[in-house]
Image (cartoon, rainbow, N blue to C red):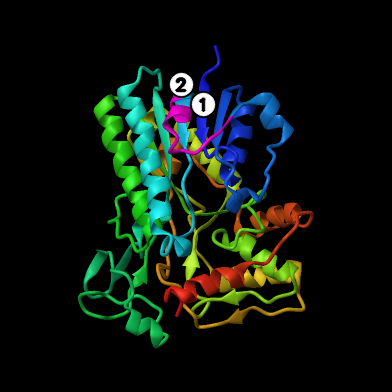
Amino acid sequence: MKERILVTGGAGFIGTHLCKKLLEKNYDVIIYDNLSPQIHGENKQIPNWMKEKTTFIKADIRDRKSLKKAVLQADKIVHLAAETGVGQSMYEIQRYTDVTIQGTSMLWDILVNEKKHVNKVILSSSRAVYGEGKYKCSKCGDNIYPESRKIENLKQGKWEISCPMCGQKLELCATDEKSMLKTSSIYAICKKTQEEICMTMGKTLGIPCSIVRYQNVYGPLQSLNNPYTGILSIFTSRLRNNKPIQVYEDGLESRDFVHVKDVVNGTVLALESEKANYEIFNIGNGKGTTVLELAKILTKYINPNLTPVITGRYRMGDIRHCYADISKAREILGYKPRFDIETGIKDFLDWAQNEQAKDLSDNAENELKEKGLFI
């Protein structure tokens, strides 16, 4: 008999790719999604393959009756449902905490109080839980975990991280799963809280739980009309509308950009491996790419007549650098990313060229300005 996998948020960007992969591997799939207009657009219709090959439940993650119905059918759960986006989380605090934390609480409340046969839970978390990540200091040593950057420094264009003990410039290190967690946004707090709920209740109930901390995910199906999350999609929409990319700070801030197919592969490996039980894994590319470098690559392919604009502006809640140490996922799960940044961008753009792209990034910036969250 086929195992049944419940994927919350299964109609979203990552969820859609994941559900396709699970079907290919001959699982029965239950998709639970509220088809949020911000992510899916108005009057979203799910594709035919979802209707025909999966059990689709349209409902909010906080809807206990509907969620209970889904959970009681499942053998394993991949919990993706959450609000995403650092900037928006800083002024829609109640929505982010309610959906992400309350939704996760609802899931485990059902698991502890109802008869069920769920034997594993996978939680998708985020690199955001690390905050500024891991550094070392030539004077003070290794394993330095700085606090968020000071506003007075940012206003003066002092972007880089300094040692909290001696004040000299730090050297960035790959952030591993044992690194200290220092959240700097409401989004990050929500993901950290999700992790704590899942691990605590998983161990309490004897339901193996694995956490996959995604880095900056991109790829086909990422909405080109959502200005709140997905830097490649936001940049692409600007270029498609003949607007130059607006790069914050000095453009040298860096992230670990990972293709969605690599993310799906890492998630399935964690789902299927007993060695992954009660473990946390970074799922990324293992390399940092500056935002300016990313902007130049996209501009080259989409609209080479334009030039990225370095604005010197700053968004509250953003970090300076972070890239993942993926050695644990490689050694335990056999995870190996297949897409470097150039190859991944080409794959993304092959899909994006046939998609409608609305540039709403100025609207998102204006909302931040009104709240005093954009310098």
Q: Report the amino acid beneath label 2.
A: Asp
In the image, taking residue 175 as reference, residue 36 lies left or right, namely: right
Magenta range is 57-68
**Residue visible at 36% across and 65% down in the picture:** 132
Task: Kindly report the distance in space between the C-alpha atoms of the residues bearing marks 2 and 1.
Answer: 6 Å
Query: x, y percentage for residue 251?
Result: 53, 76
| Residue found farthest to the right | 354
Query: x, y percentage for residue 206?
Result: 29, 24
Q: Magenta includes 323?
A: no
Q: Note whether 28 is above or below 201 in the view shown.
A: above
Q: Which residue is mark 1?
A: 5
Q: Nearer the viewer, residue 121 or 99?
A: 99
In the image, taking residue 51 as reference, residue 146 lies left or right, namely: left
Asked which secondary structure carries label 2, the reply is loop
In the image, taking residue 275 as reference, residue 306 lies left or right, namely: right
Q: Is residue 307 in sight in this rendering?
A: yes
Q: Nearer the viewer, residue 113 or 256?
A: 113
| Residue found farthest to the top | 1
Q: Residues within 10 Å of mark 1 (few under 14, many from 20)?
A: many
Query: x, y percentage for residue 329?
Result: 43, 42
The quarter holding residue 240 reads: bottom right
Disc on res. 75: 2
**Residue visible at 31% across and 77% down in the picture:** 162
Q: Note whether 162 is above or below 61 in the view shown.
A: below
- Sequence order check, earlier mark of 2 and 1: 1
Total number of numbered labels? Answer: 2
